[in-house]
């Protein structure tokens, strides 16, 4: 959802984007959506599995062959399973029941994938002296704990109650650590690294969940789906040229309570 918005933010200020996805159908859908509002020539697409190191290297090589230099890397990929009993997550999302295979898969995509993309695309930015920007998309749950009361369902015993999985907090917190590390690692090469931690974005969630979450947000509402575009533009441009290693939290004030 937000990946398309991030791409739109860059296109909206005249940039070109390379969108990547594991699934070709999702990639085609993203390109079709973006092409409705922006010049198709500026939208490039590559199927890429960010958990496969060789696949990332191949993508970087292919882009270089086409004469494309990546000035900005946005690490946005994540597995964020819908947290409710109807989806089948239910009790399996609970810490005492959480499957090790799911732990490994979700960390591979959300954290290891960000590391691998940073390793290769960041190295390329640093190697030619032109620098660049790396932006990790984290979450307000990188600085606060999930309020598991938001996910409770009436009529379920405690051990069947769905919760926000442990992986989400671990991954989003890990991205902040990665941000700080990379911010000092290539600073002398002109590569800046920051993180954006969005709050909840309204995307058709159930009325009960939305009402409960909005009571935790001082502004009294969730973010609109396109409300982070200007923040992306700021963090990916020279407007933030002296900002490095920071986690910018944009959550309507939830995390300050």
Image: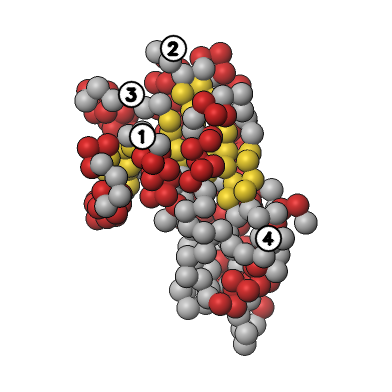
Q: Nearer the viewer, residue 184 or 97?
A: 184
In the picture of the structure, the residue carrying the numbered disc 3 is 69
Residue at point 48%, 46% (across, down): 229
Q: Nearer the viewer, residue 34 or 144?
A: 34
Assess disc 4: are there few (<14), some (14-19) or many (≥20) residues with their C-alpha within 10 Å of its C-alpha.
few
Residue 219 - label = 4
Identified at 36% across, 34% down, the residue is: 14
Q: What's the distance in space between the residues labelled 4 and 2, CA to CA? A: 43 Å
Element under disc 2: loop
Callout 4–callout 2 Cβ contact below 8 Å = no
How far apart are labels 4 and 1 at the CA level?
Answer: 32 Å
Kindly identify which residue carries mark 1: 14
Q: Position of residue 100 (x, y in %)?
A: 51, 56
Tag 4 and tag 1, C-beta contact below 8 Å: no
Q: Nearer the viewer, mark 1 or mark 3?
A: 1
Q: Residues within 10 Å of mark 2 (few under 14, many from 20)?
A: few
């Amino acid at each position: 959802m937000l990946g398309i918005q991030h791409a739109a933010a860059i296109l909206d200020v005249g940039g070109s984007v390379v969108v990547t996805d594991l699934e070709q159908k999702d990639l085609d859908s993203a390109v079709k959506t973006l092409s409705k509002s922006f010049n198709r020539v500026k939208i490039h697409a590559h199927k890429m599995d960010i958990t496969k190191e060789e696949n990332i290297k191949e993508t970087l090589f292919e882009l270089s062959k086409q004469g494309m230099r990546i000035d900005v890397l946005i690490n946005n990929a994540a597995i964020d399973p819908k947290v409710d009993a109807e989806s089948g997550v239910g009790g399996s999302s609970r810490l005492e029941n959480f499957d090790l295979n799911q732990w490994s898969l979700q960390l591979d995509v959300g954290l290891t994938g960000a590391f691998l993309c940073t390793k290769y695309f960041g190295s390329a930015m640093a190697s030619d002296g032109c620098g660049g920007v790396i932006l990790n998309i984290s979450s307000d749950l990188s600085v606060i704990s999930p309020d598991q009361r938001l996910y409770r369902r009436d009529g379920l015993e405690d051990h069947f109650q769905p919760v926000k999985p442990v992986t989400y907090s671990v991954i989003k917190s890990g991205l902040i650590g990665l941000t700080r590390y990379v911010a000092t690692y290539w600073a002398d090469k002109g590569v800046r690294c920051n993180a954006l931690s969005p709050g909840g974005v309204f995307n058709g969630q159930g009325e009960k969940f939305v009402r409960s979450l909005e009571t935790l947000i001082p502004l009294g509402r969730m973010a609109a789906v396109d409300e982070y575009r200007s923040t992306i533009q700021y963090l990916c441009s020279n407007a933030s040229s002296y900002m490095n290693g920071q986690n910018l939290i944009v959550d309507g004030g939830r995390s300050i309570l």
